[in-house]
Amino acid sequence: MPLSLNEIRKRATEFSKEWENVSDERAEAQSFWNSFFNVFGVSRKRVATFDKPVKKADGHQGFIDLLWKGIVLVEHKSKGKDLNSAYKQAKDYFPGLKDEELPRYIVVSDFHKIKLHDLEADTNAEFELKELYKNINLFGFISGYQQKVYKDQEPVNIKAAELMGGLHDALLANGYQGHELEVMLVRLLFCLFAEDTTIFDKQQFTNYIEQRTKEDGSNLGIHLEQLFQALNTHEAKRQKNLDEQVAAFPYVNGSLFAEHINLASFNSAMREKLLVCCYFDWSVISPAIFGSMFQSVMNPKERRNLGAHYTSEKNILKLIKGLFLDELHEEFESVKSSKPKLQKFHEKLSKLKFLDPACGCGNFLIITYRELRLLELEILKILFKGQLATDVKYIKQN
């Protein structure tokens, strides 16, 4: 689970004080960024690497100070150096990166100042180190907190479907088909989503694939089978000599990993397709699209028409707000100052039932459930003030 925002602010303040007088890039830069990631409760070595070799735009060999594939690239300088030049240097590394490695964010720093560039939103923010605690919201891609924004995400959903579709087609062409192929893809999709939404540790699944399987893919199926068995077994019931990296994964209740299926045989190209899927940021995909996305994955002709298979989240919210959600929020506002009335409202909320007579993938029900749970969390924050952390992680992330 992510740290509370209060804890992150506390760590950010301590970090700023610890590093306020450091200035030598060569001696301290790596320690600085290890500590920086720790502010957000993330182990740097689990997600990012130092000094990645890459050919620059001019053809010369260069080394990226820090790279989290597909997420962020960091260029660090000694105190007082020009951060605009550091940003240009960071962009010069892009031609040497694979598409799936290209970051959304560039961070440059000279210890004293930090500058964050969001390449997708085309925005940047610059602040002094001592002001980090005021700007922790900018680093939601590290901490797991993201601003809650409702908008259509059709292009990114189509991209996700194409990535999974490519893996589907490769497995199918190799003779892995039918029900077993469907189960395999659903399990992989869960793992991809889980490591980007704090169900697993950040990049836990990606690291397992990268570090424990051969580049030719020959043992990938065996490792996936071992992982699926572990995910289906409660931690207390696992064998004591189980591989430590596998044992670190949490137990997943339900029956997703219960059924035995035959091993899938992978080659180097298929392993690479899975890793490309791993480098994609699945946190930007709403759970509401998964059913429709999976449907389109199984039909290559329909992948580019993904938007035709589901009602967008934006439109779902328009409907359920008018039907009942706005009314419930108004009632919450009217009773939140009275604990007895709020308790009664909480009880009412727990007994509400919703039916979608034209349910396909369950998009309406998923969004309805999520919004009701978010409302309940607001109730609990008032009822148990002082007993619960005041920071609530929004599951919906774009």
Image (tube, rainbow, N blue to C red):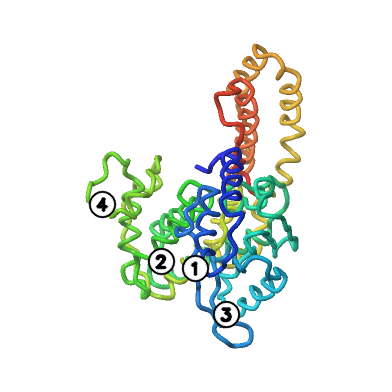
Which of disc 2 and disc 4 is earlier in sequence?
2
> Where, by quadrant of the figure, is residue 90 drawn?
bottom right
Q: Which mark is residue 210?
A: 2
> Where, by quadrant of the figure, is residue 383 drawn?
top right
Q: Secondary structure at mark 3?
A: helix
Mark 1–mark 2 distance (CA, rounded to whole Å): 16 Å
Q: Residue 396: horizontal and vertical position, in percent? A: 62, 44
Q: Secondary structure at mark 4?
A: loop
Image depth: mark 4 or mark 3 in front: 3
Identify which residue is drawn at 54% across, 56% down. Answer: 294
Q: Residue 176: horizontal and vertical position, in percent? A: 38, 66
338 or 123: nearer the viewer? 123
Which of disc 3 and disc 1 is earlier in sequence?
1
Q: Amino acid at mark 4?
A: Leu
Q: Residue 71: horizontal and vertical position, in percent? A: 58, 62
Q: Secondary structure at mark 2?
A: helix
Q: Residue 96: horizontal and vertical position, in percent? A: 57, 80
Q: Which residue is mark 1?
A: 50
Q: Verify CB contact (< 8 Å) between mark 4 and mark 2.
A: no
Q: Amino acid at mark 2?
A: Glu
Q: Residue furthest bottom?
A: 59
Mark 2–mark 3 distance (CA, rounded to whole Å): 20 Å
Identify which residue is drawn at 61% across, 23% down. Answer: 385
Mark 4–mark 2 distance (CA, rounded to whole Å): 19 Å
Identify which residue is drawn at 66% across, 54% down. Answer: 129
Depicted 197 relative to depicted 174: above or below = above
Q: Which residue is mark 4?
A: 242
Q: Which residue is mark 3?
A: 96
Q: Is residue 79 shown left or right of residue 242? A: right
